[in-house]
């Protein structure tokens, strides 16, 4: 470990198996991120193709323009709360998410939430890589039409055509090469994205308004719900999906806030950057998707598929190449850094950032990302809502522990010791594990029905309905149960180490 970046310790040394340069606390001198940095981070993170698809999927699902935007704004305002609460520990102690989780789950038990978070990041890595690869395929097939007629080589159940698969794998390999070079190699691409994507979004918006004969006909498109009951049945799971979109970052936000110059910087920067930028960029997706119905007579929710309809080969090629480069930049910044830290937490001395990046890439392939975004219902109800059922309970436990049990006070050196106050039982806090499991269980039947693992109607309607509120149910149930299980310690704060 690097002794220059650790906090002062007591006589007992930290455990080498719990610390590395990537996991050690950031010293005060190394915390340089200002309010502007955090606002810019969220603007950059929000300006991505999945955000566009998030909004357009709501239009495809039946909402009108203002219903979709309101749902997105509400969802991002809700998820901002745990984002700021979890970010406090990172800014105060300079620690990343896997280390923060040790306080509630134990120094070994923290591997469970870290791995759950990492696997979901792998899924996002796969989705972004598929989007970028398919954009390149759309470009390549214009110039090499034979790519579109290659004989099938994958099982039919995979739903994967040969041409798109080849380009996807090439783009995946490019992502892995960037991991090999290191995160610094992506800085120029991030700058390119910051300048290009807003311009491209405005250009797409201008095209939609022009081709759709103004905003009037576009925004006049009505909702497709036959009744208010049908709307509310769609709204609540959609809202849960919007919360789930950034539920990953609401957990591992300490990975970023550990660099904050102050608590005010991270709070104000995130509050200004997240809801506003998500809603504004989503507006582009809402308008363009609504315009496709006016122009083509059908809603096209995938911008890559839409761009493929343009007549100019050069225009399509430039658009698809830009999408691929932007996606590459986002993928490394948003979907490699955090899971690499999470995997490193398993064995800090053996798993480096690069190795963690490779693990992320392989799992991202095995998750079959093209199936996750094959249609809007799968994107929202299977992917976003499904993983929110895992992340909500983790967030509830961590926030309850940090704010209600420990009153925002952590023993920093003990977070890096096998025998400290966060050792619990052999490094695992059984109360946290039970709270996590019980918080997840109510959502399992609804998830199984949503993915078709059990026949429709085989789950009690009220139990299936719980799944529509997966993140909220898990957050409140696990957080409350954790406090109940730790009630003796609530009365004896000094005895928290005996849990």
Image (tube, rainbow, N blue to C red):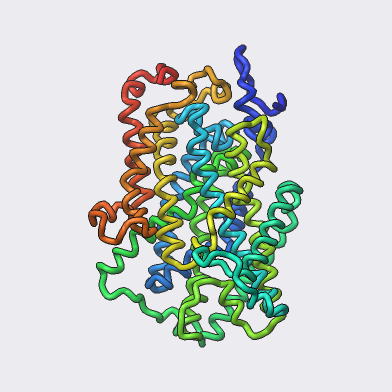
Give the image location of residue 444, x and y in percent: 35, 48
Q: Position of residue 28 (x, y in %)?
A: 65, 32
Is residue 28 at all visible to an observer of this figure?
Answer: no
Q: Is residue 252 above or below residue 303?
A: above
Above or below: residue 468 compared with residue 486? below
130 relative to 269, above or below: below
Which image quarter holds the C terminus?
top left
Q: Is residue 73 left or right of residue 167?
A: left
Question: Which residue occupies 59% across, 44% down?
Answer: 338
Q: Quadrant of the N terminus?
A: top right
Q: Nearer the viewer, residue 358 or 289?
A: 358
Left or right: 489 as drawn, with respect to 1: left
Q: Is residue 474 above or below residue 159?
A: above
Asked whether, in this view, residue 491 is left or right of residue 257, the answer is: left
Residue at screen point 65% across, 74% down: 150
Q: Nearer the viewer, residue 216 or 330?
A: 330
Residue found farthest to the bottom: 213
Q: For this rendering, which residue is in front, 439 or 9? A: 439
| Residue at the (36%, 37%) spot, across then down | 479
Residue 53, horizontal then vertical, whole percent: 51, 66
Answer yes or no: is residue 80 visible: yes
Q: Position of residue 434 (x, y in %)?
A: 36, 33
Is residue 257 found left or right of 387 in the rendered image?
A: right
Frontmost residue, 167 versus 153: 153
Q: Residue furthest top?
A: 11
């Amino acid at each position: 470990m690097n002794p220059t970046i650790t906090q002062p310790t007591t006589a007992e040394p930290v455990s080498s198996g719990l610390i590395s340069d990537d996991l050690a606390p950031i010293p005060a001198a190394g915390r340089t991120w200002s309010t502007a940095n955090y606002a810019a981070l969220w603007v950059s993170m929000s300006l991505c193709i999945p955000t566009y698809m998030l909004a357009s999927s709501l239009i495809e699902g039946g909402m009108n323009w203002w219903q979709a935007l309101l749902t997105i704004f509400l969802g991002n305002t809700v998820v901002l709360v745990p984002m700021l609460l979890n970010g406090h520990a990172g800014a105060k102690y300079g620690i990343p998410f896997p280390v923060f989780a040790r306080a509630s789950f134990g120094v070994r038990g923290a591997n469970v939430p870290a791995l759950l978070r990492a696997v979901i990041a792998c899924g996002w890595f796969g989705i972004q890589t598929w989007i970028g690869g398919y954009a390149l395929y759309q470009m390549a097939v214009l110039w090499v039409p034979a790519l579109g007629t290659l004989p099938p080589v994958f099982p039919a159940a995979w739903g994967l055509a040969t041409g798109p698969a080849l380009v996807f794998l090439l783009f995946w390999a490019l992502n892995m090469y960037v991991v090999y070079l290191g995160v610094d190699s992506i800085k120029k691409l991030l700058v390119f994205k910051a300048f290009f994507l807003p311009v491209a979004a405005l250009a797409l918006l201008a095209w939609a308004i022009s081709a759709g004969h103004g905003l009037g006909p576009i925004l006049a498109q009505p909702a497709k719900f036959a009744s208010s009951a049908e709307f509310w049945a769609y709204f609540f799971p959609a809202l849960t999906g919007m919360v789930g979109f950034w539920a990953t970052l609401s957990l591992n936000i300490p990975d970023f806030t550990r660099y904050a110059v102050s608590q005010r910087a991270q709070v104000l920067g995130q509050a200004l950057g997240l809801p506003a930028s998500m809603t504004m960029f989503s507006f582009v997706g809402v308008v363009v998707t609504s315009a496709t119905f006016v122009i083509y007579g059908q809603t096209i929710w995938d911008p890559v598929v839409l761009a493929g309809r343009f007549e100019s080969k050069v225009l399509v090629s430039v658009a698809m190449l830009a999408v691929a480069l932007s996606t590459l930049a986002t993928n490394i910044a948003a979907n490699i850094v955090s899971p690499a830290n999470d995997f490193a937490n398993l064995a800090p001395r053996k798993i480096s950032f690069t190795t963690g990046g490779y693990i992320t890439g392989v799992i991202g392939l095995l998750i079959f990302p093209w199936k996750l975004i094959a249609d809007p219902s799968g994107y929202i109800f299977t992917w976003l809502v499904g993983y929110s059922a895992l992340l909500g309970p983790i967030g509830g436990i961590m926030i309850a522990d940090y704010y209600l049990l420990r009153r925002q006070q952590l023993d920093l050196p003990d977070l890096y010791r096998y025998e400290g106050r966060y050792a619990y039982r052999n490094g695992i806090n059984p109360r946290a594990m039970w709270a996590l499991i019980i918080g997840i269980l109510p959502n399992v039947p609804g998830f199984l029905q949503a993915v078709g693992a059990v026949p429709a109607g085989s789950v009690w309607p009220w139990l299936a309905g719980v799944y529509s509120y997966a993140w909220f149910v898990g957050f409140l149930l696990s957080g409350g149960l954790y406090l109940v299980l730790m009630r003796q310690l609530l009365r004896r704060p000094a005895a928290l180490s005996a849990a």
